[in-house]
């Protein structure tokens, strides 16, 4: 694991750097293909910027609110650059909410916008897995297989590598403008990505060593993946059978 990268006298937090690189590369790919889905690249860029800023601010605000005692005697620490002082899920929810509000105010088509964002989400899937590999998060179960990695005093499945490879395969299969999805109805491209991601999560979660177990070895993430997979498949079926509107036929 390599959580800190020393570049001369500067110590760089490598997981954060990987995530930033993933966001940047994903944004470039999404902007490049936005017109394919009838979305303005500038509008998509602005929406992502608003969502990211809102997500970071929301993540810090929620963390500070939940741990106020730790900040009460030193209010300046609220503005610390430490990424550990962020509520991850709270930030995600704030980012989604801000993106929805921005898209509605700018009258951006909901499903077409999600299709335009899909390449960025696919790249983020790769960068999150690599960031976890760098930090040691999302570690795997103990194993005797020759490709296991030493972590936390045991030889473990490189689950982060499995997830990075799976995300790369999904990105390759669902590359913008490729195959049958090139002329798919709005929303189908995004839902296919969600279905593929949920399907791989069902399989790869079995190799994780820090999953929350429910009963009979079933993991909470797998339950969530089943629900997401079912919902996305229903959505794909619905859009596939829906009669095209006059605008879509043109």
Image: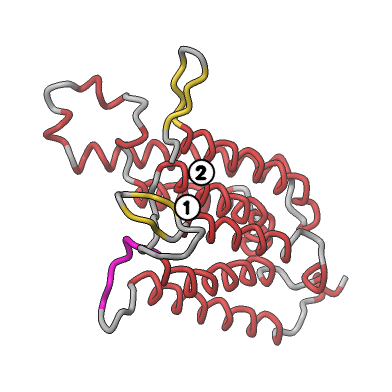
Residue 80 locus on image (x, y percent): 32, 24
Relative to residue 127, is residue 12 depicted above or below?
above
Q: Residue sitting at 17 percent across and 39 percent down?
A: 67
Residue segment shown in magenta: 208-214
Q: Quadrant of the C terminus?
A: bottom right
Badge 1 local density, few (<14 within 10 Å), some, or many (20+)? some
Of all residues shown, which one is farthest toward the bottom? 241
Look at mark 2 in the image and give the residue it sits on.
51
Q: Quadrant of residue 183?
A: bottom right
Mark 2: few, some, or many residues within 10 Å (few <14, many ≥20)? many
Residue drawn at x 58%, y 42% as measured from the top left: 23
| Residue occupying the far right of the picture | 250
- Cα distance between the residues tagged 2 and 1: 7 Å
Does 141 sit left or right of 36 as displayed? Answer: left
Q: What residue is disc 1 on?
A: 96
Query: Looking at the image, which residue is at 36% across and 41% down?
Result: 58
Task: Using residue 225 as the reference point, say whether residue 38 is left or right of it.
Answer: right
Give whichever of 190, 245 is nearer the camera. 190
Residue 45 image point, x, y percent: 65, 40
- 50 or 60, which lies in front? 60
Query: Vertical placement of 53 versus 230: above or below?
Result: above
Image position of 59 with respect to 213: above or below? above
Q: Position of residue 174 (x, y in %)?
A: 72, 64
> Between disc 2 and disc 1, whose residue precedes?
2
Look at the numbered disc 1 and give the secondary structure of its residue: helix
């Amino acid at each position: 694991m390599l959580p800190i990268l020393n570049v001369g006298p500067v110590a760089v937090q490598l997981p954060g750097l990987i995530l930033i690189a993933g966001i940047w590369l994903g944004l470039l790919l999404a902007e490049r293909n936005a017109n394919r889905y009838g979305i303005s690249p500038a509008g998509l860029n602005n929406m992502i910027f608003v969502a990211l800023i809102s997500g970071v601010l929301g993540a810090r605000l929620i963390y500070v609110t939940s741990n106020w005692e730790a900040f009460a005697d030193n209010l300046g620490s609220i503005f610390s650059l430490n990424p550990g002082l962020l509520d991850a899920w709270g930030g995600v929810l704030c980012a989604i909410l801000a993106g929805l509000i921005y898209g509605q105010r700018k009258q951006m088509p909901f499903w077409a916008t999600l299709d335009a964002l899909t390449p960025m989400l696919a790249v983020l899937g790769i960068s999150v897995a690599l960031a976890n590999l760098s930090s040691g998060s999302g570690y795997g179960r103990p194993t005797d297989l020759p490709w296991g990695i030493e972590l936390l005093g045991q030889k473990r499945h490189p689950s982060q590598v499995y997830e990075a490879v799976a995300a790369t395969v999904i990105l390759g299969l669902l590359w913008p403008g490729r195959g049958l999805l090139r002329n798919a109805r709005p929303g189908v491209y995004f839902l296919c990505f969600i279905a593929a991601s949920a399907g791989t999560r069902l399989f790869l979660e079995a190799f994780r060593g820090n999953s929350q177990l429910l009963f009979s070895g079933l993991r909470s993430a797998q339950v969530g993946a089943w629900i997401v997979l079912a919902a996305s498949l229903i959505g794909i079926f619905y859009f596939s059978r829906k009669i095209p509107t006059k605008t879509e036929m043109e």
